[in-house]
Amino acid sequence: MLKLPLILMCLPIALLDFAMPKWKADPSVRVEDAYKYLYQATMGGEHAAPSRDVAKERLDAELTSMGDEPKGENLWEPLCPDGSIGRLNLRPFRAAGGKPDDLLDAFLGSVNDRRPDPSAFVEAWTELGRRLRKSGTVGLDHKEWLRLDTATKPNGYPALSHSDEYRKARRPAYRVLALDRAQMLIPN
């Protein structure tokens, strides 16, 4: 199958216009969470799938340990304005009777179908820094952006974990999927 670059589906400026209102409305979002969001939207979930066995181990462990809270999560959270890539939340997936093996196949299919676009990440991340220099919020400001940029840039902008604040507030449990793969799992 043809691997499509994520930049064609999720342009950096449109991505930020879509994401920033969400981040500013969520007091638990920190600069690490914005970084992770941009990373997933432009790079996909490849970093979380070094092999099928490792991806299965991680999914099984997360499904076992995630608990039932928080309630009211959406099954699908688009990361881009066109919805072409997003987060499929595990709690509502499990509650709807979703099968872990089907999710694993969809996740790995998404990884195989999409080509990460590091330049799109850098463009979106740099634009976020410019925007935060003009107007930031608590936990998501230019000083914190600069701190994280200084720490990650020398390492080629690696994948990061969510901030402690976000993990405590949201208890994130999801897989990044392409929309076409997610639609095979989402009940009508």
Image (cartoon, rainbow, N blue to C red):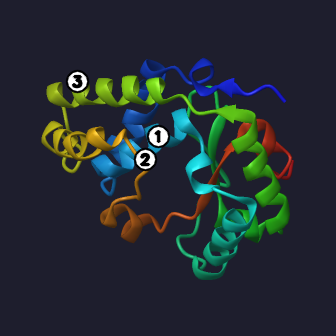
The quadrant the N terminus occupies is top right
- Tell me what residue is drawn at x 75 percent, y 70 percent: 95
Residue under numbered circle 2: 36
| Mark 2 and mark 3: Cα distance apart in space | 18 Å
Q: Residue furthest left?
A: 143
CA gap between label 1 and label 2 equals 5 Å
Q: In this figure, which residue is indicated by the disc labeled 1? A: 39
Residue 121 appears in the figure? yes
159 horizontally vs 47: left or right: left
Left or right of residue 158, residue 67 in this image: right
Residue 35: x and y in percent read 37, 43
Left or right: 130 in relation to 32: left
Q: What x and y, as percent, mark residue 185?
A: 83, 52
Q: Position of residue 28 (x, y in %)?
A: 32, 57
| Distance of label 1 from label 3 (alpha carbons) | 17 Å
Q: Amino acid at mark 1?
A: Tyr
Q: Are marks 1 and 3 in contact (CB under 8 Å)?
A: no
Q: Amino acid at mark 2?
A: Lys
Please tell me which residue lies in front, 146 or 98. Answer: 146
Q: Residues within 10 Å of mark 1 (few under 14, many from 20)?
A: many
The residue singled out by tag 3 in the image is 130
**C-beta proximity under 8 Å, tags 2 and 3:** no
Three-letter amino acid code of the residue under disc 3:
Arg
